[in-house]
Image: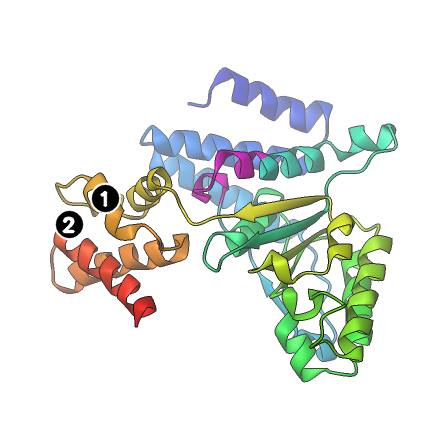
Amino acid sequence: MATADQVKSLIKSFLADNDKNRFRTLSLQVAAHEAKKGHLSLANEIKKIVDDSQQENNKIIPFTPDLSDLVLLTTPKGHMGELVIADDLKLKIERVLKEYYNKSKLTKYGLSNRRKLLLVGAPGTGKTLTASVIASELSLPLYTIQMDKLVNKYMGETSSKLRQIFDVIKKQKGIFLFDEFDAIGTERASENDVGEMRRVLNSFLQFIENDDSESLILAATNNILLLDQALFRRFDDILDYKKPSKEQIKILMGNKLAGFRGEFEISDVVKVAEGLSHSEITLACLDAIKEIILDDRKKVTKTILKKLLEDRKKAYRD
């Protein structure tokens, strides 16, 4: 059963703090604890109760038709345990969650919780997953704003669309991820820049600086060097993502192949996976699982996994 500390924290979050988000998160931690002990039925029942409660309590304000093609609403899934990232990066994310849970304490001292985060790193290193995990942990809907479509489809109207999006951010509490952020966030002094994009960036800087909503605003980019320097001081924190280390590769493959791995040491294939992103390694593991299922085999072999990892690397060399 749940540990004594978990039970005490659950009671405190509900009776003393009246913090429903904290209560849900602690409930999921209890579910994870029970799953590790092999009590899968109980763990699934707890998770279903929490998920059903989340769906009932989240009142989603629909986007107007002229914004619906720019914003994707998804039901977030995932938990902190799925993030196989550097310890210092995980601590930053945990600090965001902790400040959100305790924002009423901070408000008493004239302080606010971290709400504006810049996520930087190569594709497939965990930026989008982080947004989903934060949304899931906080029991909030996840909205993804497709910045490339905003710029390409609505040139001349971009600033107006941004204003509409920030109006929704104020009305609808949630996690708002500005994906492909460098589409508008490039250096304003760039020789290739155009007047329209400078105006759009200036508008974004103004909107995000004036935002005082309860939502969390995340911006993701693959290249921090492209961003205008004025952006950095508008964000409460910068999260820098790297490709997985050897140890992280072992953990990631162990997680993804759980229940399907044959009699081989994961360390034997780590070298083949070096240089690939989290997403590429995950896809190779899932391909290996699908292959053995279709061939009516039960376990992934070292040979199969190495081949699929090498195929991923070869695709980039070619």
Q: Which span is picked out in magenta?
A: 79-91
Is disc 1 placed on a helix, strand or loop?
loop
Front in this rendered view, residue 36 or 102 = 102
Task: Report the residue at 58% width, 18% height from top.
Answer: 8
Residue type at mark 1 is Gly
Image quarter where the C terminus lies is bottom left
Task: Report the residue at 62% width, 74% height from top.
Answer: 148
Magenta: predominant secondary structure element?
helix
Task: Report the residue at 66% width, 81% height from top.
Answer: 152
Q: Is residue 302 left or right of residue 7?
A: left
Is disc 2 placed on a helix, strand or loop?
helix
Asked whether the viewer can see residue 69, the reply is no
Identify the mark at residue 184; answer none if there is no mark.
Answer: none
Q: Is residue 274 left or right of residue 203?
A: left
Q: Residues within 10 Å of mark 2 (few under 14, many from 20)?
A: some
Q: Residue 248, percent across and down?
A: 37, 41
Q: Name the residue that disc number 2 marks.
A: 302
Q: Name the residue that disc number 1 marks.
A: 259
Q: Residue 74, percent across and down?
A: 57, 61
Q: Residue 173, percent across and down?
A: 73, 53
Q: Quadrant of residue 317?
A: bottom left
Front in this rendered view, residue 137 or 90 = 90
- In this view, which residue lies farthest toward the front? 191
Q: Is residue 11 above or below residue 132?
A: above
Q: Is residue 169 left or right of residue 269?
A: right
CA–CA distance between discs 2 and 1? 15 Å
